[in-house]
Image (cartoon, helix red, strand yellow):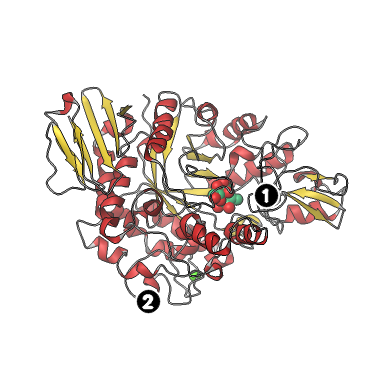
Amino acid sequence: MERAWWKEAVVYQIYPRSFMDLNGDGVGDLNGITSRLDYLKELGVDVIWLSPVYQSPNDDNGYDISDYQAIMKEFGTMEDFDRMLAGIHERGMKLVMDLVVNHTSDEHRWFVESRSAKDNPYRDYYIWREGKDGKEPNNWGSAFSGSAWQYDDATQMYYLHLFSKKQPDLNWDNPKVRDEVFSMMNWWCEKGIDGFRMDVISLISKPEGLPDGQMFPGMEYSPIPCANGPHVHEYLREMNREVLSKYDLITVGECAGVTIEEAKKYASLDGSELNMVFQFDHVGIGDAEHGKWTDRRVDLVELKKVLDGWQTGLAGQAWNSLYFSNHDQPRSLSRFGDDREEYRVVSAKMLATCLHMMQGTPYVYQGEELGMTNCPFPSIDDVRDIESINAYKEMTESGKITPEDMIRYIRLRGRDNARTPMQWDDGKNAGFTEGTPWIMVNPNYTRINAKQQTADPDSVFHYYKKLIALRKEEPVIVYGSYEPYQQENESLYMYIRRLEDAKLFVVCNFTDQEQTVALPEDFAEGSVLITNQENAGVQHEMTIGAYGAVVIRR
Ligand code: TEU
Ligand code: CA
């Protein structure tokens, strides 16, 4: 397989609002990030993916952009940005920006113009439709509750917003929109950034005629039927020609609704579109009639079928991203592992082993390397995320879910679990801010923080550091084939990697009970490459302790 730096890289995602606040206003900022770059260098990551830092009214914490070429005032200035970028490059790391171009903020000048008059030159930068029989133009629902259409008095028409009312969708069928986006992207590339993470890029091409979507029992609106639309690959190939192919970038498309077949186009190894995609099949396991608002746990066999499917499905044709965590997901340790204190460290290391030994580019979300956990939000008043706040209102007012159950589901699956302040030390506000944090600090910061873990060689932090270093030392981890092993085993996640004469056997125990497994015969002479177990040896009959992980190299 052709080698490439972005296949060998490990990416670290920063959610700037919650990473480090240097000016004491309780909100993270760019100078705060710059002050913590040595920590990231020590961890050994190669690329930093920065969630949006552009000018925004923060209806969706920066995913509603009002000026793509200005820095959000709360985060600092363009000079602060340039200083941070220089600091990243000086340390041999790269910067990926978050490209949010399925929609803008309703405060973007394009939308202010577009909504002002039907004949405004910017009118067709967005998607306007007449109502139908006094109602919205179709039955599409917003991802943030309610209709995906907002009636606008100024011109007595509706505009489309797949997300919040303050996030009107851009009309990608308009070549002027595509040209505006591509010139903005080139502007950032000329500043020296090294790639893009593309927000909901699978949704940019809407189905012809905007037909009604499929309805489901108990739902007032149809789930968004825009994934993998008619022109999405045409537009991405155009983006590749106009921007991406001119620079040495890493690109990842966030592709809600993507299938393995579609991913072979988005992430084709022929370089015609993007390097890789974020798929959602594994993080959606257990979703029920009200989507993610459920307390269902993840079934291991189902998880294996999903991830093994992506590993074998893309092999040799497209490249995988590898993630369990990000700013939209609950903490992976709580979701896929076991955050009870007696198992927290061992299970965090096990999850990391399971993910980082696969084929693809791994993404570490801020705090994941510390084994940070979900947060026990006392009430809905402590929740900040528009998705959770709108869902709480919708579900409790309709009687679909009781307030008690809804706050329990938010504690399990809400996005704010990943957005509580990064836990730097056991001092005031976990060392995140001298001010009042915009969102509560997880009370367990006194036990779980970077200061304590960078000093402890047996910490989750140092385990991630070892995994990241191994990816540089062992080509089989990056370029080896992937072979599921005993997929029906309900307790152990096992797989085999092979590259020329090197091979790995990976076994991860997803339970709090000791398990045994017979070692595949051609590993009997192997040695332990990495493990979270005390004195794990190589025996024909392997005993794996609670949440144990062992990687045998041959
Ligand atoms: O997320 C898109 C997306 O699919 C989210 O709706 C996510 O899957 C869901 O919230 C999980 O419950 C992107 C950004 O990552 C997210 O932060 C933004 O809110 C959203 O797009 C709109 O920009
Ligand atoms: Ca600040």
Q: Residues within 10 Å of mark 2 (few under 14, many from 20)?
A: few
Q: Amino acid at mark 2?
A: Lys
Q: State whether residue 153 is above or below residue 273.
A: below
Crowd band around label 1 with a 10 angstrom C-alpha radius: few (<14), some (14–19), many (20+): many
Q: Residue drawn 45% across and 58% down?
A: 418
Name the residue located 39 percent from the left edge and 54 percent from the top edge: 334
CA gap, disc 2 to disc 1? 39 Å
Q: Are marks 2 and 1 in contact (CB under 8 Å)?
A: no
404 with respect to 486 (left or right): right
Where in the figure is residue 346, as x and y percent of width and height? 25, 52
| Near-viewer residue (523 or 481) | 523
The percent coordinates of residue 459 (x first, y second) are 24, 57
Which mark is on residue 142?
1
Q: Residue 156, labelled with which disc? A: none
Residue type, numbered disc 1: Ser
Residue marked by disc 2: 428
Element class at badge 2: helix
Left or right: 65 with respect to 441?
Answer: right
Residue 76 in view in this figure: no
- Residue found at x 46% / y 56%: 412
Of residue 461 and residue 84, the one placed in the foreground of this image is 461
**Where 421 falls versus 14 (above or below)?**
below
Classify mark 1: helix, strand or loop.
loop
Q: Quadrant of the C terminus?
A: top left
Give the x, y percent position of residue 301: 38, 36
Q: Is mark 1 within 8 Å of ligand 1?
A: no
Q: Looking at the image, is mark 2 or mark 1 earlier in the sequence?
A: 1
Is 250 placed left or right of 233 in the picture?
left
Q: Relative to 338, say whether 444 is above or below.
A: below
